[in-house]
Image (spheres, rainbow, N blue to C red):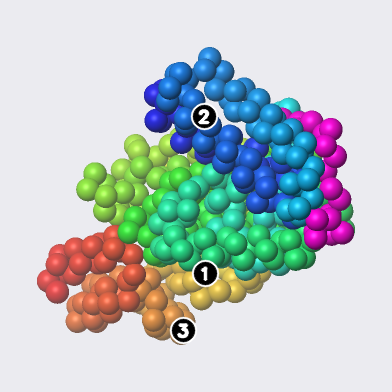
Amino acid sequence: MKEKELIPHLFKTEYRKIISVLCKLFGIVHIEVAEDIANDTFLLAAETWGLKGIPDAPTAWLYKVAKNKTKDYLKREKIFSEKISKELKHAPSPSYELELDLSEENISDSELQMLFAVCNPVNSNESQIALALRILCGFGIEEIANALLSTKDTINKRLYRAKSVLRENNIDLSFPSKLALENRLDNVLSILYLLFNEGYCSSTSSKSVRKELCFEAMRLLYILTENSNTNVPKANALMALFCFHSSRFDARIDQSGQQVIYDEQDKSKWDLELIEKGEYYLNLSAKGRPISKYHLEAGIAFWHTRIKITHKEKWNNILQLYNRLLQIEYSPITALNRTYALAMAESKETALKQALKIDLKQNHLYQSLLAELYNGLDPAKHLHHLDLALKLAKNDNDKLFLKNKLAKAGG
């Protein structure tokens, strides 16, 4: 791999590790110090490797430089004291003799602790996602801005505020107690769920699928499933959901970048290995109670991957799972999806009666569903709701998809 390609790759994989270990050493109140050391490490790599070539062990080189820069920083007692003396009463000052531990075990522990700190509900969901993308996924500011359809200035301000809130609330990196773990874990899973959804079905990006966001959510979730304290049924259920959804990535978008609806997808493009992994995690999730929304959504996604069953069997199972999901946690979007399953399992006429009761008139997905339900029943209303859906759509890909549907329908 060339130097121009290797450094961005290593930034994605190693930046988060160095930051996490440094924050564990300094405390999250000094997160900017950790960022400075990590950034300086990669800056030196870019300068040195460009002149002398890539070292034999690039990752070990980065770790050695990070350790040396940490030692240099800690030795500058006067500068250290001047910079953060006002904060010393809030957090212990690191010893100047401390060694930066970049062992695999400490990196793993540090990343898990950092995940809980970054996904602390003292910040808004939007801030938690931005911070996770920056600190835990190694995304650049421009990448985050593009992913969240924002500006670099807005993202910089959001990150600054988020880190300030963590400092002001004196958030530490200690692992949550058993009593606090469940609530904290629920929040972490919720943030990873939102991050994956933004990649899987973006409502804002010009791309319908942002694989890199989905895979980062899966990577962070994998950290949870590999730790005995957080390897719980709902975490495995969420991983199963991610695997099932990810298995159909290549079939969801055609060669021109346009969406392909489920019924028209080329099943040969489904990733069978990911489906098998989804089944593995779904089986693990069954080892415990209670049943979470992630269990039910994973079950729905599981039935979507079934090929060798009848249409009726598939959609009856999906419909029953949606019924249970609405009992656990009602949302208009879930009701919307359940209505489509009802149309598939029973009839469009039955589903239409339910759809008209849902209050989502300003949602393009709702208007798209009504258009689908009226298709074959009332041509005028079919076109009318397609037109409404197009006017409400925000995603460029969704707009193109709806324009094509309108053209085919004669609108």
* Left or right, residue 395 beside residue 166: left
Q: Does the magenta stretch include residue 348?
A: no
Residue 394 visible, this orientation = yes
The residue at the point 51 percent across, 36 percent down is 43
Q: Is the magenta stretch mostly helix, strand or loop?
A: loop
Alpha-carbon span between mark 2 and mark 3: 55 Å
Which mark sits nearer the N-terminus, 1 or 3? 1
Q: Inspect this view and state whether residue 218 appears.
A: no
Residue at 80%, 60% in the rendered image: 86
Q: Which of marks 1 and 2 is nearer the N terminus?
A: 2
Q: Give the range drawn in magenta.
A: 85-102
Check the image and report above or below for 378 versus 142: below
Give me the residue at 39% from left, 83% from top.
Answer: 361
Q: Do the residues labelled 1 and 3 touch (CB within 8 Å)?
A: no
> Which residue is under mark 2?
45
Disc marking residue 334: 1
